Amino acid sequence: MAKMDRGKRPLSPHLSIYRPQITSISSIFIRITGNALLISTLLLVWWLSAAAIGPKAFSVVDFVITSWFGDIVMVLSLWALWYHSLGGMRHLIWDTGRGLELKTAEAMGWAMMLGSLILTFLTIWFLNG
Amino acid sequence: MSTSKSGTGHFLEMTISSIALLALIPLFIVIVGPVIGEDYEVVTKYFSRPFPAIVFAITMTIVLLHFKSGVVTLIEDYVDHPARRLWIFVMSCVSYLSIALVVLATLRLAI
């Protein structure tokens, strides 16, 4: 590769001309959900650490977690957790060499989207019921 | 860190931790979920029991190890040298320090 062309060549993937497909969208959301889950993970680390320290430390994190901000983070994280889990299952299936046909791969992408929403509602219903 | 040297190890890390998490995450939601948002007395008493403490400690530890492997891939894809090493170092510190806090907190609440 000639080094002098480097600056002119477009970077892959060519996002500006790339037609969104369920396979690529469902894939990038695995990455987004997985990494964004650090926020609620750290919230839970803070939550249990504060509980171990004492009531004063706990009241701060409890205020954050039970606020409207905490509710939004927890509900989004719940969806992210289910989505990422279903996406992980898809990868484990793919790793065995199965489900790589376009139709199956696309169906699994839609199943992840729909399945994660259903599981999120079921979990909220379970936790509040 | 880079795939050219330890790709198989990284693959195994992600595969094994993801299989473990498929079992642990639903358990975590059922066992830990109901007490998130509860009062101090309820939470501390709940985690003084061995089973909830073990579910919390094991799940969070594997979650953070899985996160660490995943975020390294993210950084390798999007961050160039020389910032790449720094970011991997920072995120590794965040992951391992969090694991240490989880273990310390569960131990302290259990004893």
Image (spheres, coloured by chain):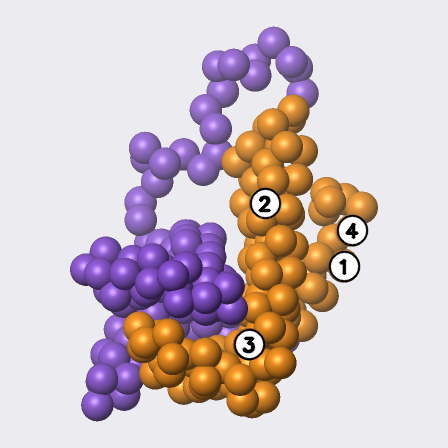
Amino acid found under the numbered disc labelled 3 = Leu
Q: Sequence order check: which comes first, mark 1 or mark 3?
A: 1
Circles 4 and 1, Cβ within 8 Å, touching? The answer is yes
Q: Which mark is residue B109?
A: 3
Secondary element at tag 3 = helix
Amino acid found under the numbered disc labelled 2 = Met
> What residue would you read off at disc 4?
B6
- Find chain B in the image and tell me its colour: orange
Chain assigned purple: A
Q: Sequence order check: which comes first, mark 2 or mark 3?
A: 2
Camera-near label (4 vs 2) is 2
Q: Sequence order check: which comes first, mark 2 or mark 1?
A: 1
| Number of residues whose C-alpha sits closer than 10 Å to that of mark 1, classed few (under 14), some (14–19) or many (20 or more) | few
Compared to A14, does A88 lie above or below? Answer: below
Q: Are marks 2 and 1 on the same chain?
A: yes
Give the alpha-carbon distance from disc 4 to disc 2, as whole Å: 19 Å
Q: Sequence order check: which comes first, mark 4 or mark 2?
A: 4
Tell me the quarter of the picture where residue B46 sits. bottom left
**What residue lies at 54% left-to-right and 45% top-to-bottom?**
B74
Q: Position of residue B24 (x, y in %)?
A: 53, 81
In which chain is the residue bearing label 3? B
Q: Position of residue A68 (x, y in %)?
A: 19, 60
Circles 2 and 3, Cβ within 8 Å, touching? The answer is no
Q: Position of residue A115 (x, y in %)?
A: 32, 77
